[in-house]
Image (tube, rainbow, N blue to C red):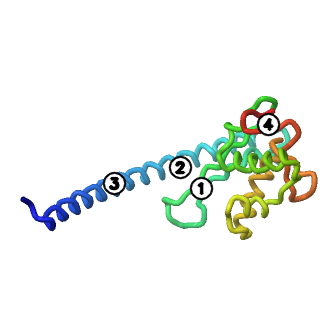
């Protein structure tokens, strides 16, 4: 009969091998991700350049919000995250076309609308989502809310106070 210490050593060895295998796989995935982000950046730059050339007013209209490039580090592995695409709202467009962050904002405002409680500020949204109401978190929410306003999902009748736009309803559908 094997000893308890021997069994523990066998389990430890198996766990160590699994960890090493997962680390190798994680390194491979990181390398693949870096290559894909680099390719995405090249396409985003090309699209932006073509959009600038093709705009009738010589490029003074912003083509898209996606801005490729490093995010603050000098390492080649750090690259900009792809931002979520927010389509222009139209009758019948479901919330499922939006990323989870945008759906969460819409959900909070839909709840307020359903309860007839009025608009919310981004600071109130941050607190509602359990985030620290620090400027970085609030500004991230404000950026998303402003993007939703620009695309017709939200309304901002008073500066900094957001509600669902007319016609936008619950998460089951866009109208």
Give the residue drawn at x 50%, y 64%.
75
Give the residue drawn at x 26%, y 59%.
15
Which label number is shown at residue 80?
Answer: 1
Q: CA distance from mark 2 to mark 3?
A: 22 Å
Residue 93, position in %: x, y? 75, 32
Pick the residue in front: 22 or 164: 164
Q: Are marks 3 and 1 in contact (CB under 8 Å)?
A: no
Outermost residue on the bottom side: it is: 134
For the residue carrying disc 1, how many other residues have a C-alpha within 10 Å: few (<14), some (14-19), or many (20+)? Answer: some
Whether residue 2 sits left or right of residue 151 in the image: it is: left
Pick the residue in front: 89 or 131: 131
Label 3 vs 4, first from the N-terminus: 3
> Which residue lies under the disc numbered 2?
37
Nearest-to-viewer mark from 2 and 3: 3
Residue 143, position in %: x, y? 76, 56
> Which residue lies under the disc numbered 4?
89
């Amino acid at each position: 009969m094997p000893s308890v210490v021997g069994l523990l050593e066998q389990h430890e060895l198996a766990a160590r091998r699994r960890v090493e295998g997962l680390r190798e796989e994680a390194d491979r995935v990181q390398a693949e991700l870096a290559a894909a982000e680099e390719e995405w950046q090249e396409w985003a730059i090309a699209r932006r350049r073509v959009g600038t050339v093709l705009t009738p007013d010589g490029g003074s209209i912003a083509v898209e919000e996606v801005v490729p490039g490093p995010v603050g580090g000098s390492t080649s592995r750090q690259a900009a995250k792809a931002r979520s695409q927010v389509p222009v709202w139209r009758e019948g467009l479901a919330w499922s076309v939006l990323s989870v962050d945008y759906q969460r904002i819409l959900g909070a405002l839909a709840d307020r609308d359903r309860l007839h409680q009025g608009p919310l500020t981004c600071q109130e949204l941050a607190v509602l989502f359990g985030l620290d109401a620090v400027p970085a978190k609030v500004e991230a929410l404000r950026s998303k809310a402003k993007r939703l306003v620009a695309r017709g999902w939200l309304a901002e009748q008073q500066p900094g106070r957001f509600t669902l736009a007319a016609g936008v309803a619950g998460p089951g559908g866009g109208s």
